[in-house]
Amino acid sequence: MNPANPTAPAAPAVAARPVVEMRGITVRFPGVLALDEVDLRLRRGEVHALLGENGAGKSTLVKALTGVHGIDGGSITVDGVERTFASTADAQAAGIATVYQEVNLCPNLSVGENITLGHEPRRRGLIDWRAAHEQAAGHLRRFGLDIDPRSALSSHPLAVRQLVAICRAMVLDAGVLILDEPTSSLDRSEVERLFAVVRDLRDQGVAIVFISHFLDQVYEISDRITVLRNGRLVGEHVAADLPRGELVSAMIGRELEELETIGRSAARSVDRTTTPVLRASGIARSRALEPVDVDVYAGEVVGLAGLLGSGRTELARLLAGADAADAGTVAVHGTPVRLTTPHRALARRIAFSSEDRRGEGVVGDLTVAENILLGLQARRGWLRPIRRAERAAVVAEYVSALGVRPADPDMLVRNLSGGNQQKVLLGRWLATAPELLILDEPTRGIDVGAKADIQRKVADLAEKGLSVLFISSELEEVLRLAQRIVILRDRRRVGEVESRETDLDGLVGVMAQTPGATAGVTREVL
Amino acid sequence: MAGVVRHRLFWPVVSLLALVVVNAAARPGFVRVTVRDGHLYGALVDILRQSAPLMMVALGMTLVIATRGIDLSVGAVMAVSGAVALTLIDRSADPGAVGTVLVAIAAGVGIGVVLGMWNGFLVTVLRVQPIVATLVLMLAGRGVALLVTGGFITTVTSPPLKFVASGYVFGLPFALWLSATAVAVVAVVQRRTALGLLTEAVGINPEASRLAGVRSRGIVFTAYVASGGLAGLAGILYSSNIMAADANAAGEFIELYAIVAVVLGRTSLLGGKFSIAGTAVGVLVIQTLQSTVLFLGVPSAQSPVFFAFVVAVVVLVQSPQLHRRLGRLSRRHRGPAPATAQQPARDMEVSA
C-alpha cells in the first residue's frame, strides 16, 4: 500500500542485532492508553530488567510481546523478521517463553509431565512416559535440580516449581525468556539458585527479561534496564551506569527525598494508660499459632515482625475472625468478644486486609465503587442498601483521599494495577469506620509511589486515633510506621520492642535468633 | 453505535429479533395481534403466555448460577408442587372455590420453598457440591410427587385453577402477568436492595467476600430458596395448563432449558455477574424457537434435533470467543504482507 515504506534499516553485524526489537508499541484498552509508543530492544546473552511502577505498562508490554494482547501500533521484530503475534502459541513458536508470577503449571501432575506437557515424546502414536521422564530428568539436571520427575509438582516448594516452570520454558529452546516477578515468593537462598540458572542461560546466549520490584536483585543480575512510566518509555540504561537514586526517580517521576520524609510516625508517643482498643490474651489455634498476647491502644500502630511462617499472618487472621481461635480471649475496649467470623469482627470495628490481594481482597469483576462499598454494605446487611447519594459520596471520598488511578468508580477493579487495587481495598476497610485496622502486607508487590501513599495514609490515620496492626516483610517499613513492634518466631511471640529503641539489625537479630542473619528478610530501597 | 454492539444483551436481543423476523416471513399471521372480547390473541401473545413456567424457573436458576451453583431439581420441584396443589384441590369439599385454590397454590409454592431450603441446607451447611446436592432431589422428587398423588395422574375440575394458566386480566393472559410480576419482583429485590451486589460478590470471589464481612451462607441459601419457590409456582402454572398433576411429565428437562436460557442471557456458568433481563430474553428465544419448530411442522421425533441445532447456532453467534477469532482472522488476512503491515488493524475490540 505504501511503497515508500522504509525497509528494515541497514543491519549492522548480526551479533549486535537485537534478537527482539519492539518499536513504537501502542496498546489501547477501553478508555486507557496502556502503552504509548514504547520501544524495547533485547540482545542475545543479556539480562534486561524491565522496571516501572505498577500500572507503568510492564505487564502490558510483556503481554504484547507474548501475543496475549494485540498491538494497536508499532512493530515487533524477532531475529530481523517482523512478526504479528495473534496468540501466545505464535510467540512461543518464535522462541519467546514466559514464566509468570503465578506459576502456570498443573500442581496435580508430576514434574516430568509438567515439563513435557504438549510435546511429549511418542512411540507409535502413544506417549512414551519413560522417555518423557528421562528427558525431563535431563533438563532438570541442567538446572541443578535433583528431583524425581515422577514426583507430584505440588509436593515441591514454590521455588522449585518456579525453576520447573523455567525448565519447561527452556525445553522449547526459547531464545527469549521472560521472568515476571520470579523472586517475589522466594527466600534468599532460593533466589541465589534461580540467579545461577539465569546466569547460565544468559551465557548460553538467551535474552532474558527480568521484571521485579526488588531493586537489589535488579542490580545484582541485570545488564541493562528499561524504565517505563505511565505507559511511556523513560529510557534504556546500562545497569552499571545508573545510580539507584536516579533509577527510583525515573520510575516514580518525583524526587526520592520526598519519600524519605514520610511521617516519622514511629517516634510519636502513644498514651498506653487507657483501656486498649484490643487486648488478646493467650489467643491460639492448633497447628497455626501458640498462645500469644497482644494489646493495641488507640492511635497506636503496632508492627508484627517475623519471618514467613512465624505466625504473624495467623495471628492477624485470628484477630479478624478470618479463622476461629481454639483458645484465649479477646476484649475490645475491655468488653470480652468472640470473633468467630469476619462479619462479627467488622461489627466490632475490626477490619482486616489480607496479604492475598487477588485471592482474598478485591472482587475482580466488580467496579471500584462496588469494591469500596462491599464491606460497609456487608455490615449493614442486604436489606438496607446504601442510598445512591451516600454511595457516591463515600466512593468519591476514598477514591480522591487515597489517590486511586484512574479515578473512575465504574472501572472494573481487575483492570487496575496492584497498587491501585490495594488503595481500593484500603478504601473498603476505611469506609466501614474501623477502630482497629489490620493490614497484612499492604505494600507487597506494589510500586514505590503507591507504597509511599499507603504508608503516609496509615501514619495520618493513626495520628487521628485509628489503631493499626501492621504486618510487612519490609522491616524498614515496620520501623518507620509502628511505635511498638511485636516479634514472632516459630508461631510464638518472642519479644516486643519500642521502635525508638531498636534498629533494623536489632530487629532481625530477635527475629532470626542469630544476630546479623538476614535470611528471608527482604530489603528494598525505601 | 459501538456502545450498542458491545452491550451485554446485544447478541441475545439480535437472536430474538432474528427468530421473530424469520417467523414473520414464514407465516404472515405471526406478528398479528387481534382483539377478541377485549382479550389479545396471536402467536406472540401465545409465546409470552407459554413462556411463563420456564421464565419462573430460569429466574431462580439465574440467581443460583450467580452464586456458582446450579439447581437441577427444579423440574422435580414443579412435579411435587403440582402434585401437592392438585391433591389438595381434589380432596377438598369444594374444588371450584377460590379459597381452596388459593390455599392449594400457597401449599404448592410453600413446598417449593421447603425443597429449596433443603437444597440450600445441603449446599451451604453440609457443603455438598451444588450439582450433586440438587441431583438428589432431581432423582427423588418425582418419586415424592408420585407418592403424593398415589401413583395416578390427578385431574381436577376447578375454574379458578384453570384461570391461572388460561385466564385473562386487562386483555392479557394472567400467566403473563404472573411471570412479568416475578421478573419485576426478582429484579427489584436484587437491584434495589443490596442482595444483587452481595450475590455477585459471593459468586465472583467467595473468600474475598467472606473477609469483607458478607455472610455468604445466607446469600447462597436465599438463592436456592428463591429457585425452589419459583419452581413451585411454575409447577402450579403447568398443572393449571393441563388441569392435572402429572408427576412424570411436569417440568421434564426444564432444568436444562432453564440453564440454556440463563446462558443465552449472558450469565456465566462460572457465577458472578448475572442479568435478569438477559435471562428473560433467553427464555423468549427458547419459547419462540419451540413455537417455530411446531409451526414448521418438524416431525416430533426430529424436533429436538432441530431445536438443539438452532440453539447451538445461537450460542455460537453470541460467543465472545468466536467474535475474537473472527476479528483475529480478518486481522491476519490483512496483516502479514511484510512491508505493509506496520499497523495491523484491530477492528474487533475484545470486550473485557
Image (cartoon, coloured by chain):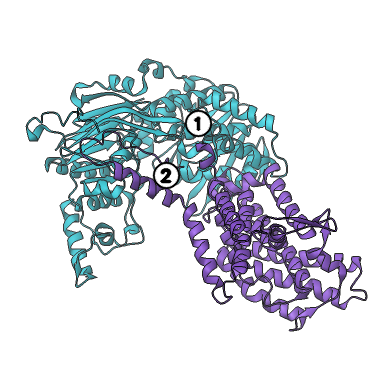
Chain colours: A cyan, B purple
Could you tell me which residue is drawn at 12 percent across and 40 percent down?
Answer: A203
Q: Which image quarter holds the C terminus of chain A?
A: top left
Residue B92 relative to residue A325: left or right: right
> Mark 1, chain letter?
A
Between residue B221 and residue B274, name the one nearer to us: B274
Could you tell me which residue is drawn at 55 percent across and 55 percent down?
Answer: B264
How far from the left and from the top, in percent, is residue A36?
34, 27
Q: Amino acid at mark 1?
A: Lys
- Above or below — where is A339 with respect to A420? below
Could you tell me which residue is drawn at 18 percent across and 31 percent down?
Answer: A223
Could you tell me which residue is drawn at 42 percent across and 16 percent down?
Answer: A261
* Extreme residue toward the front, this view: B28
Label 1: which residue?
A: A423
How far from the left and from the top, in percent, is residue B198?
62, 46
Q: Which image quarter holds the N terminus of chain A?
A: top left
Residue A190 relative to residue B153: left or right: left
* Secondary structure of residue under mark 1: helix
> Mark 2, chain letter?
A
Q: Amino acid at mark 2?
A: Ser
Label 2: which residue?
A: A310
